[in-house]
Amino acid sequence: MTPEDAILAVLAERAANATICPSEAARLLAGPQGDWRAEMAAIHAATDALVDQGALRLSWRGAPMQKRRGPYRIARR
């Protein structure tokens, strides 16, 4: 599974307007015994790529974000 696949898989399990924490995708990518924190850099990079492609939108506390910076939530476009 790629980091992009992990993000999209977690989003697919949620309601259309729901957001996810990037750590949820990292946990899926790492697997049950894996180190999810080690996967965060890959998840951040995949998030940036998917935002650039127009597939995702970012927010924090309900406010839209143009680019990833600090804490953020991920949603489908």
Image (spheres, rainbow, N blue to C red):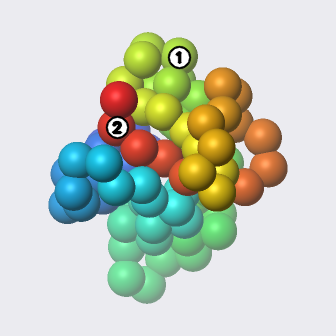
Which amino acid type is marked by label 1?
Asp
Local crowd size for mark 2, using a 10 Å CA cut-off: few (<14), some (14–19), many (≥20): many
In primary-sequence order, the first of circles 1 and 2 is: 1
Report whether 8 appears left or right of 42. left
Which amino acid type is marked by label 2?
Arg
User: From what the image shows, is residue 33 above or below residue 26?
Assistant: below
Residue 4: which quarter of the image?
top left
Q: Is residue 45 visible?
A: no
Picture disc at residue 38: none
Q: Residue at x 21, y 57 (%)?
A: 15
Report whether 76 appears left or right of 58. left
Q: Under tag 2, what secondary structure?
A: strand
Residue bearing mark 2: 76
Cα separation between marks 1 and 2: 13 Å
Which quadrant does the C terminus fall into? top left
Depth check: give the residue in front, 29 or 55.
55
User: From what the image shows, is residue 30 above or below residue 10?
Assistant: below
Residue 54: which quarter of the image?
top left
Picture disc at residue 52: 1
Q: Is residue 4 visible?
A: yes
Residue 63: which quarter of the image?
top right
User: From what the image shows, is residue 7 above or below residue 26?
Assistant: above
Q: Residue at x 52, y 61 (%)?
A: 21
Local crowd size for mark 1, using a 10 Å CA cut-off: few (<14), some (14–19), many (≥20): few
Where does the image place residue 2, in percent across and percent down from the top left?
37, 43
Q: Residue furthest top?
A: 53
Q: Residue at x 37, y 73 (%)?
A: 31
Residue mark closest to the camera, 1 vs 2: 2
Q: Residue at x 53, y 16 (%)?
A: 52
Q: Are marks 1 and 2 in contact (CB under 8 Å)?
A: no
